[in-house]
Amino acid sequence: TVVGRGLIRRIDPADVRREFAAQLERVIRIGVPVTHLDTHQHVHLWPSIGKVVAQLAVSRGIPAVRVPRSRRKHPIRIGVNLLSAQLRRQVARAGLRTTGDYAGLDEAGSFFGATFIQTLQNLADVPDAVLAVEINAHPGEVDDELHRFDWGYHWAEELGQLTDPDTRALIERLGFRTAPFPALSTPLT
């Protein structure tokens, strides 16, 4: 795992840079607009990987990096949030943007129903100084290829939650508005 390799200092930033740069170049070459950088399973929380991601964002003119965090009442929360705070500082030093808060890491694959509603209500209680929050979900169709992964995710239920008119009404009632990453107007300071 990334954490295991990181703990024994077996992550080579040059290898990470080559691989991520190649993937990013391919995405850009096929014409996909890149609004922010993220990594699969948020491995960029690991400091040496986060540094590479921030450097690639700067070098390619990508304005934002996702900075996940955890709210779970579990010891893992402490480690995730320490790494998250460090990544947030890297992102800020690089002059990049991110959201002020985040939800979806702990809820991955089960972000629907009461869990989704409670999370939105909790985010509505975040201080006004936090101008942007990110909801990270994993929607998919029932017959989607994503089902080749045996993660126990409820892809279709998350899609149903996100497309439900009641969700839109709840978002508006709580005072949120939806926007993509490019709507983040200023870099962190």
Image: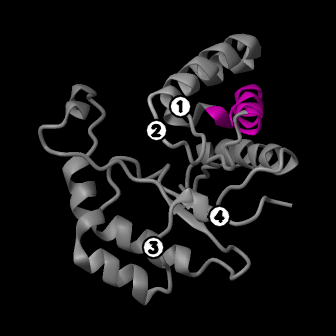
Q: Nearer the viewer, residue 164 or 55?
A: 55
For the residue labelled by badge 2, is the local secondary structure a helix, a strand or a loop?
A: loop
Task: Kindly identify the amino acid type of the residue bearing the numbered disc 2.
Answer: Val
Sooner in the amino-acid sequence: mark 4 or mark 2 = 2
CB under 8 Å between discs 2 and 1: yes
Q: Amino acid at mark 1?
A: Ile
Q: Are marks 3 and 2 in contact (CB under 8 Å)?
A: no
Residue in the picture at 51% in, 26% down: 29
- Tag 4–tag 3 contact (CB < 8 Å): no
Can you tell which mark lies on residue 32? Answer: 2
Give the secondary structure at mark 4: loop
* Quadrant location of the N terminus in the rendered image: top right
| Residue at left offset 36%, top offset 65% | 115
Q: Quadrant of residue 98?
A: bottom right
Farthest bottom residue?
173
Contact? badges 1 and 4 (CB < 8 Å) = no
Dot 3: element = helix
